[in-house]
Amino acid sequence: MPKGSDLLVTALENEGVERIFGVPGEENLDVVESLRNSKIELVLTRHEQAAAFMAATYGRLTGKPGVCITTLGPGALNLTTAAAYALLGAMPMVMLTGQKGIMKSRQAGFQIVDVVSAFKPLTKMSRQIVSPATIPTLVRDAFRIAAEERPGPVLLELPEDIAGAEAEPITMVRRHPIEIPVAHRASLDRAAEMILAAKRPLIMLGAAASRPRSTAGIGGFVRRTRIPFFTTQMGKGTATGGSNLYMGTAALSERDYVHDAVDRADLIIAIGHDTIEKPPFIMGPEGPQVIHVGYTPANVEQVYFPQCEVVGDVGPSLELLADRVEGRLHNAGALLSLREGILARITDRNKEDRWPVTPQRLVHDVRQVMPEDGIIALDNGMYKIWFARNYRTYVANTVLLDNALATMGAGLPSAMMAAMIYPDRRVMAICGDGGFMMNSQELETAVRLKLNLVVLILNDGAYGMIRWKQSVDGFPDFGLTFGNPDFICYAEAYGAKGARVTSVDALVPTLESAFKEGGIHLVDVPIDYSENTRVLVEELRNR
Ligand SMILES: Cc1ncc(C[n+]2csc(CCOP(=O)(O)OP(=O)(O)O)c2C)c(N)n1
Ligand SMILES: [Mg+2]
């Protein structure tokens, strides 16, 4: 007779799960045994948070829920940050947690936390499995809920006695394709009318534009309408091709060069904008009209209140919208004359050979060693603004950054996941010395998994972004610097390779040889953040 854990693992196989990331505890041992007898690979990590960052990134890149597993109490609670990361970032993920038995209580309250309740505000669904008989339906429901728009995390708690309980064999619930409805004709007509009437239209690509299923439709819309576009931070790269229409990325909410175009636009077609992102522009009573194109209706915010909504499967809906306006747009390129000026300001000083390296030069040099389909995965720190603003992308989902929870610590695990999914592409994690150390223990996992990955550490001996804000706000420099380990020795202790960049000319060759050699390479580069204030405060303020 199968046990509850066998049914769970069969249900996971039924969902097409290939890998589960996590740190099991004794309450998961039945599940571990069932996994041993399955085709699913158990990938151990050194912290539950990293397991869930990896699972969430799997969901983000494939559209299918990534799966992670932990024990009860302490292990489960280590998932909270990554659950919030997946919830805000709309990444499908299924978290499986253990629990003490529920039919008897032989350990009283030891390690027991109400995990299901703790995760209610951090998930789309959080449920305890109370009987083996319900496992096939609950698992099917969990995967559906995690993956359907708007995607996100779900949690299933499997108590150890239910996992170990013998059960009648139960047939699994078959998966079937579900088509997302296409936008209503009336909304398409209304949007088309607004686009045809616009004098200075602009497209904005937001976070949801990065869903793998919408890439082709978005590229087609941009090519057919020839309307210039800008992106949010998480929408970067989502219009494959069409790069001669790219106007920039809104890393700041206002006053950056890209806002020259935004402020002049009379219509913004916001494709896939998700208001969990720091606002890419601030809507006001006087500003442009906005058409929201999304899988789900717009959230109404003080800074975002579209006048027209095209809700439905984004790719096919855009195709229908393009059918209505293609060849009839007389002002499509009205804002294009601003493009060269904006992009020239963004590439300003990107070849300067100051040392330590400046953020502009760093972004430039990283782009040199990354092929068009290479993936950079950013942690959170000051450099994220520079990469969002200055890095050019050509292929969808080649920049993994988190402008939603904006948590530190996800850079390395998300890069590891990208390297696992795309073993033939170059992948680079880009981390501050602060954020890297928040999950640096996963170097062991990366080495064990024999991944090819370059981890670039930007060394300023500080929580640089906060230190910068402290100074911008006029506070004295206090309390935000720290010491670092010798990162080269640190890498070597894990069996990885380490290199320290000691001159600006050495950056490209060091990164290049790290990629050529393969394996895990940690590259430590000192960074000069004085440009933060010179450009992002003074230059932009004085425009
Ligand atoms: C988990 C978490 N803790 C704190 C913060 C607040 N925070 C944002 S950036 C930052 C400093 C990042 O330092 P580092 O990783 O060294 O990057 P740097 O800005 O120095 O380049 C902090 C503390 C956060 N976003 N996430
Ligand atoms: Mg730092």
Image (cartoon, helix red, strand yellow):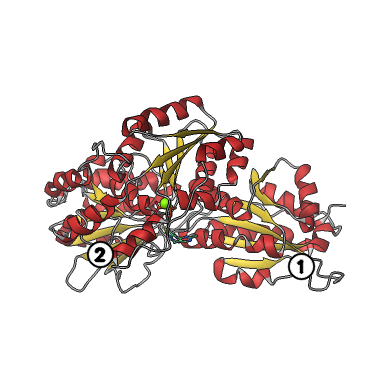
Q: Residues within 10 Å of mark 1 (few under 14, many from 20)?
A: some
Q: Is mark 1 within 8 Å of ligand 1?
A: no
**Residue 403 seen in render:** yes
User: Mark 2 or mark 1: which comes first in sequence?
Assistant: 1
Question: Count the marks: how many?
Answer: 2
Secondary structure category for the residue under label 1: loop
Q: Amino acid at mark 1?
A: Val
Instruction: Report the disc number at residue 130.
Output: 1
Q: Which residue is mark 2?
A: 290
Quadrant occupied by the C terminus? bottom left
Q: Residues within 10 Å of mark 2 (few under 14, many from 20)?
A: many
Closer to us: 223 or 412: 412
Q: Amino acid at mark 2?
A: Val
| Image-quadrant location for residue 304 | bottom left
**Residue 138 seen in render:** no
Q: Position of residue 282 (x, y in %)?
A: 26, 67
Closer to us: 12 or 118: 118
Q: Name the quadrant where ligand 1 sits.
A: bottom left
Residue 331 as seen in the image, left or right of residue 295: left
In the rendered image of this protein, does residue 455 appear above or below residue 165? above
Secondary structure category for the residue under label 2: strand
Q: Position of residue 462 (x, y in %)?
A: 42, 54
At x 86%, y 57%, the residue is 166
Instruction: Report the disc number at residue 530.
Output: none
At x 74%, y 70%, the residue is 112
